[in-house]
Amino acid sequence: MKILTIGAAVVDIVVARVLPMRGAKQDVAHIGLYAGGGAVNAALNFAARGAQATVQAGVGADLEGGLIAGLLARHGVHVAFETVSEPTGKAVVMVDERGAARAYAQRGASARVGGHGFPGLAACDVAYVTGLSLESQAHLDAALSAPGGRGWRLVVTPGARQIAQPEALRILRREADLLCMNIDEASRLCGEAPAAAHEEFPPERAEALARRILSREGQGVLITLGEGGALFHDGRAGHFAPAQAVEVVSTVGAGDAYASAFVHEWAQGADPARALTEAAASAARILQVLPANLAGALREVSQASPGSLSPGNRS
């Protein structure tokens, strides 16, 4: 199976566990440099599962872009980077003592993907689209609106900027074979306020939102509920599965891990129960490490091996 991931490739600077001290300078337990971004995280997970994964993303002509490309290549992911004049995007990810992550992103070159089209679409079986800038989304809209049919399936995991402008998301929402988002994003897309912190989300609420999000026959919606599990609506009925109970180290990347594992199973025709179970296991692995994927730190690129990510290397 050939999967093209489209979206962000960034450097994640992960800062964990600020130690309480007086003064302007604070000690922390960990600072690490990792490859991140939705397109990168998903592609690494797809490749670890035996798929032929390609990343299309924008990077700068700089050291950071080269490091990300090298890491991906060492893990068996093909790189189709567009080099632009802006620097490679970066994100500072703060992880608190409970594992909750907050990111401060400077998107840089990641906001420019698609300026030269999407030539990889014709050869893929699945196009997995992560959060895009509105400029990049317009490029993809044009590709989707071109005459002629398509022999590949479209999965969309929209970002916050896209969800904040639902009219701009209209074409992607209509064309998607599968839409993936968390419960807050689903609520916003439906014009509802997101829930308060620690509020529980019953599967019935997620299913009601999924039915509102569905826009055509044959489309599916996956809504993750954090610790509450996930709900997949296949257009006919909702299917719920709980999350796996783990000690959370960091929540960064867990959504990418869940959605990409689900898509890998879904695209191969697995039943919803199996796809949801595989997705929960994938998210559980990421919740137990600090970075957003299992590829290791960028400084360890020379030590990486294609098999080191594998959860089983199933084709």
Image (cartoon, rainbow, N blue to C red):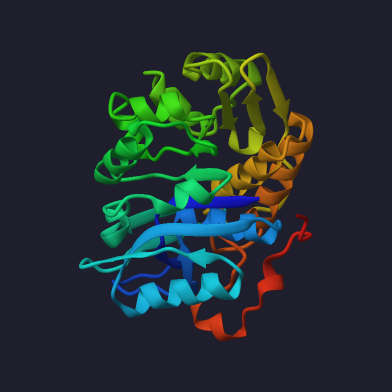
Residue 252 location (% of width, % of height): 52, 54
Residue 184 location (% of width, % of height): 46, 30
Q: Residue at x 55, y 53 (%)?
A: 42
Q: Residue at x 78, y 56 (%)?
A: 314
* Residue that sits furthest to the bottom in the current view: 302
Of residues 52 and 311, the one drawn nearer to the viewer in this rendering: 52
* Whether residue 314 is situated above or below residue 295 in the rendered picture: above
Q: Quadrant of the C terminus?
A: bottom right
Of residues 29 and 252, the one drawn nearer to the viewer in this rendering: 252
Q: Is residue 137 left or right of residue 299?
A: left
* Residue that sits furthest to the left in the current view: 85
Q: Is residue 196 at least partly visible in the picture?
A: no
Residue 26 location (% of width, % of height): 38, 72
Q: Is residue 177 at least partly visible in the picture?
A: yes
Q: Residue at x 52, y 37 (%)?
A: 155
Residue 142 location (% of width, % of height): 30, 37
Q: Residue at x 54, y 19 (%)?
A: 210
Residue 171 occupies quadrant: top left
Residue 23 occupies quadrant: bottom left
Q: Is residue 89 left or right of residue 203?
A: left
* Whether residue 25 is situated above or below residue 290 in the rendered picture: below
Q: Is residue 208 left or right of residue 309?
A: left
Total numbered labels: 0
Of residues 19 and 293, the one drawn nearer to the viewer in this rendering: 293
